[in-house]
Image (cartoon, rainbow, N blue to C red):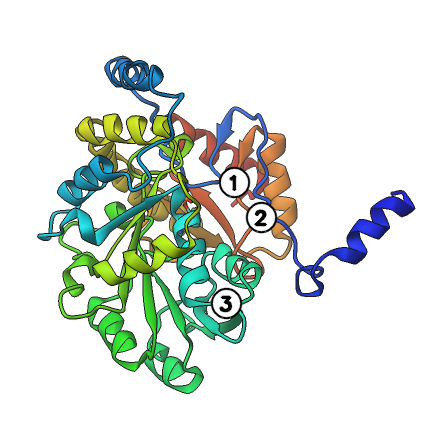
């Protein structure tokens, strides 16, 4: 690169210089099982509803959007249930932006955030970008979190992340443990439920813990079970005081009119994407069984992806699958790989490719 570029690099914040950008590969291959999306695209009727919703607001695009996304928050509160009101719900461009706003408001210079690794890689990255010191908490050997509350007591972080089901392990966290973490935490406890809808039947959401816990935040997204990753819509439920705090850091008009309209159309037609959840859960359980039958080690999963291994050279396995048109994710602890559950045809393609790359 030119010396002019070096001059720019020299101006970058010193605390960002060692970081790498988020980089899940986006490759145009036939079977994409790497970013935990719902593989089922919208039906003809849902596509029409989305097109109608966009057409309905197109004539207003000379104006800024509803800054507070009032109607959308009503719809989200209605979807979440648990007696939540729109004043307890907030929305942004993906739950990544929700996490960023939370850290801008409750983290920042001189403050710290703690998560239990391995977990979602953006928690530490957004922490560092917002000047929040990251504390890498630990999990048990089986990815449980039996010492979570002790770690929180020890480090006294301003923000704690509990991801349930966890990415990349798929592990669900029992509610009693989340309540314990809350009891030990001096500050905000963010329960990231991006994959909440995929949890096993009867697994309660941390939304049930919200009453009487004003420092608890439950984050959700429309990117996974809702099959709307391209819409970029994340949301949270929390005490109204949390949302008041976020109003200070959010950019004015952060959520476009088009995003709000498309998200509302998707929520109105939610029965369609949510009907795929059961199919994907079955696909997950089948795939877990199949991988175990092949002698592989597989983490228990309550999500729409599976962490499996343990390979001496996971990069070679990942590349072998890619050479056969199947893209999965090279992530997680050393030796492990993560595969997203796809359609039955995609799962079969993955099985065929893995059988070739890792013969029994
Ligand atoms: C645990 C977790 N949280 C949050 C997100 C961010 O999702 P989005 O920004 O698409 O809502 C992801 C995406 O993979 C995730 O795995």
Quarter of the image where one finds residue 166: bottom left
The answer to whether mark 3 and mark 2 are in CB contact below 8 A is no
Asked whether, in this view, residue 155 is left or right of residue 86, the answer is: right
Of marks 1 and 2, the one in the foreground: 2
Label 3 Cα crowd, 10 Å radius (few <14 / some 14-19 / many 20+): some
Residue located 28% across and 64% down the image: 173
Looking at this rendering, what residue extends furthest in the front direction? Answer: 63
Spot occupied by residue 273 in the image (x, y as percentages of width and height): 25, 30
Whether the residue carrying mark 1 lies under 8 Å from ligand 1 is answered with no
Closer to the N terminus: mark 1 or mark 3? 3
- Mark 3–mark 2 Cα distance, whole angstroms, equals 20 Å
Of marks 1 and 3, the one in the foreground: 3
Image quadrant holding the N terminus, namely: top right
Mark 3 — residue? 108
Visible residue check, residue 87: yes
- Mark 1–mark 2 Cα distance, whole angstroms, equals 16 Å
Closer to the N terminus: mark 3 or mark 2? 2
Mark 2 — residue? 22
The answer to whether mark 1 and mark 3 are in CB contact below 8 A is no
Mark 1 — residue? 328
**In the structure shown, which secondary structural element does the residue marked by tag 1 occupy?**
loop
Spot occupied by residue 76 in the image (x, y as percentages of width and height): 21, 41
**In the structure shown, which secondary structural element does the residue marked by tag 3 occupy?**
loop
């Amino acid at each position: 690169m030119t010396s002019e570029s070096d001059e720019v690099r020299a101006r970058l914040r010193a605390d960002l210089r060692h970081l790498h950008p988020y980089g899940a590969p986006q490759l145009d291959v036939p079977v994409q099982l790497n970013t935990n999306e719902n593989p089922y695209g919208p039906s003809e009727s849902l596509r029409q509803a989305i097109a109608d919703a966009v057409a309905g607001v197109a004539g207003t695009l000379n104006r800024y959007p509803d800054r507070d996304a009032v109607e959308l928050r009503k719809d989200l509160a209605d979807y979440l249930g648990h007696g939540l009101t729109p004043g307890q719900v907030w929305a942004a461009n993906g739950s990544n932006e929700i996490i960023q706003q939370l850290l801008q408001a409750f983290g920042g210079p001189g403050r710290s955030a703690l998560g239990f690794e391995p977990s979602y890689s953006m928690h530490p990255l957004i922490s560092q970008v917002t000047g929040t010191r990251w504390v890498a908490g630990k999990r048990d050997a089986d990815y449980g979190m039996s010492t979570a509350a002790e770690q929180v007591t020890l480090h006294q972080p301003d923000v704690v992340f509990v991801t349930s089901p966890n990415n990349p392990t798929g592990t669900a966290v029992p509610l009693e443990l989340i309540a314990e973490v809350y009891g030990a935490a001096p500050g905000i406890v963010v329960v990231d439920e991006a994959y909440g809808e995929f949890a096993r039947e009867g697994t309660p959401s941390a939304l049930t813990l919200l009453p009487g816990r004003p420092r608890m935040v439950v984050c959700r997204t429309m990117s996974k079970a809702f099959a709307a990753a391209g819409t970029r819509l994340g949301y949270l439920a929390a005490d109204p005081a949390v949302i008041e705090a976020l109003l200070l850091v959010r950019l004015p008009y952060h959520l476009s009119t088009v995003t709000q309209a498309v998200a509302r159309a998707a929520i109105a037609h939610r029965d369609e994407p949510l009907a795929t959840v059961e199919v994907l859960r079955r696909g997950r359980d089948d795939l877990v069984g199949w991988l175990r039958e092949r002698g592989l080690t597989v983490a228990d999963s309550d999500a729409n992806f599976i962490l499996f291994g343990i390979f001496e050279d996971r990069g070679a396995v990942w590349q072998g699958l890619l050479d056969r048109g199947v893209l999965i994710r090279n992530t997680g602890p050393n030796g492990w790989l993560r595969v997203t559950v796809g359609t039955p045809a995609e799962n079969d393609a993955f099985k065929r490719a893995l059988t070739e790359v890792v013969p029994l």
